[in-house]
Amino acid sequence: MAIPFLRHHKRKQASRSAAGNTVSFLFLTVLGIFMALPIVLSVSNSLKPLEELFVFPPKFLVRNPTFDNFRDLFNLMSESWVPFTRYMFNTVFVTVVGTFGHVMVASMCAFALAKKKFPGAKLIFGIILAALMFSVQVTAIPNYLIMSGLGWLDTYLALVVPAMAKPLGLFLMKQFMEQIPDALLEAARIDGATEFQVFYKIAIPQVVPALLTLIIFCFQDLWNMQGATYIYSEELKTLPYALGQISAAGISRSGVTAAVTVIMMLVPIILFVACQSNIVETMASSGIKD
């Protein structure tokens, strides 16, 4: 049994030449640099003084870096009659609560659809697949009518509750829940575990990469949400809305706009870098079946 394995292993090693590895490494390096250019450009623009922002031909990298753009941004925010910390609290609250709720709802529903046999399961999953085809713009008016009918306009509920029911997270979690062996779940039930214990202690640890990927996607969507359609009170508006109003003042605030771009993308990038290995594992194993 060992001889065929060794022969196969040698053939596999022989097929990987040093030249091929070098070409692959160079290609991925060039591709990585190309994808990092927009981030570098955003950071560079945020550090440019106004005279460098309007120079022609434009320069990719900053020549005389300065933090005046960030200083002007915080000065403008401090002059607002609603404190900057209030906008930050609103964004953090909506992002954290909405992400937590979406992860819990998507995980529990995915577990039921993947591991429970009940009438209408295929119909429900078909509706979820159909919901993936509709963009946010298509569902904006129905969502507004529903929020208005429930009396949730100008409340946190108008932003948090719809985020919990996004179909993408449910679809992703169901595909991974299906890969969990049924024998593992049955063994836990035979040992006396309740259904919630089977879900929390057996199923969830098996899909941690998908769970972290879902957290990042949901976090990014909510972090950049303005919510101006449902929120009218200035005390409840989010940070992206406030920063968008500041950067929309015209050409004179181009530097402030560049600083706003860096601030809004900083937190999602940090979260992505912290969980990138799990995202790669999710993408690599998304099509594997037992």
Image (cartoon, rainbow, N blue to C red):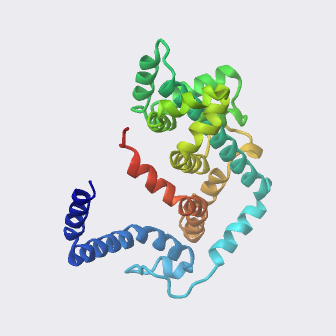
Q: Quadrant of the C terminus?
A: top left
- 182 to the left or right of 157: left
Res. 160 image quadrant: top right
Residue 134 makes an appearance in the image: yes
Q: Provide residue 52's location: percent of width, then percent of height.
A: 50, 81
Res. 243 image quadrant: bottom right
- 235 to the left or right of 135: right
Frontmost residue, 245 versus 87: 87
Q: Is residue 269 above or below residue 166?
A: below
- 219 to the left or right of 154: left
Frontmost residue, 112 versus 104: 112
Q: Provide residue 112's location: percent of width, then percent of height.
A: 54, 25
Residue at figure coordinates x 69%, y 49% from the top left: 91
- 132 to the left or right of 160: left
Q: Is residue 146 above or below residue 69?
A: above
The tally of labels here is 0
Residue at figure coordinates x 27%, y 73% from the top left: 21
Residue at figure coordinates x 56%, y 49% from the top left: 212
